[in-house]
Image (spheres, rainbow, N blue to C red):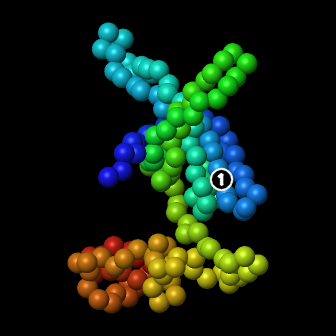
Amino acid sequence: MSTDTKVTVTGWVGTQPKHFVSEIGTDFTSFRLASTKRFYNRAEDAWVDGLTTWFTVKAWRSMAVNIAESLRKSDPVVVHGTLTSETWESPDGPRTTIVIEADAVGPDLARGQATFRHTVHTKAGEAPPASDGGPTDPWAVNGTDSAAEPAPDAGAEEGADEAQDGELVSADDRTVA
């Protein structure tokens, strides 16, 4: 049984993510995460910010590269991982930093939109596959980008009727092309 303390924290990227590669070639990225509790103050009839808790988020390997390529300072994020602490010496004496060793990091979609791209992994020395301008979705169906084309309506009849102008009209008389 694991005794790790797992946490999920929502907040804002507080520093530009820093990406490093170790001497043995392991990717590592870290950034500071600010999480501020908000509460409704009835006396002021307004939402009020509480104290901000700061975390250092650490990630390794492919997630480290993805974070460095995807996140920027001030992005809203959700971080899930193992809660730890690190103690270090400063000129003013010992200090402690709260650390989240990330298992998953992503945009907070309650605060904005995001578009997902799959990571293309290549072996050392191999060039990434050339883009032929075709679909980038590995789950594309019949050579089409499934994310770009909406699925047909379940209630629509197969085929479409030709309108007088040359427009295609669906069975429920909505213009589709």
Q: Is residue 90 above or below residue 21?
A: above
Residue 33 can be seen, yes or no: no
- Name the residue located 25 percent from the left edge and 78 percent from the top edge: 154
Most extreme residue toward the front is: 1
Count of number-bearing discs: 1
- The quarter of the picture where residue 122 lies is bottom right
At 23% from the left and 78% from the top, the residue drawn is 155
Q: Quadrant of residue 167?
A: bottom left
Q: Is residue 156 left or right of residue 125?
A: left
Direction left: furthest residue = 155
Where is residue 96? Give x, y as percent.
57, 27
Q: Position of residue 36 (x, y in %)?
A: 47, 28
Relative to residue 94, is residue 2 depicted above or below?
below
Which residue does the numbered mark 1 point to in the structure image? 28
Q: Nearer the viewer, residue 86 or 167?
A: 86
Coordinates of residue 81 in the picture (x, y in percent): 45, 47
Q: Amino acid at mark 1?
A: Phe
From the viewer's side, name the closer residue of 112 and 166. 112
The local secondary structure at tag 1 comes to strand
Along the viewing direction, whichever of 9 and 114 lies nearer the viewer: 9
Question: For mark 1, does the 10 Å Cα neighbourhood hold few (<14), some (14 to 19), or many (20 or more) residues?
Answer: many
- Residue 19 in percent (x, y) is at 70, 51
From this view, report whether residue 116 is shown above or below residue 108: below
Residue 5, visible in the rendered structure: yes
Residue, x 40% and y 25% (percent of image)? 38
Q: Is residue 21 left or right of residue 176?
A: right
Q: Quadrant of the C terminus?
A: bottom left
- Which is more toward the observer, 140 or 20? 20
Residue at point 60%, 62% (across, down): 62
Residue 7 placement, left or right of 32: left
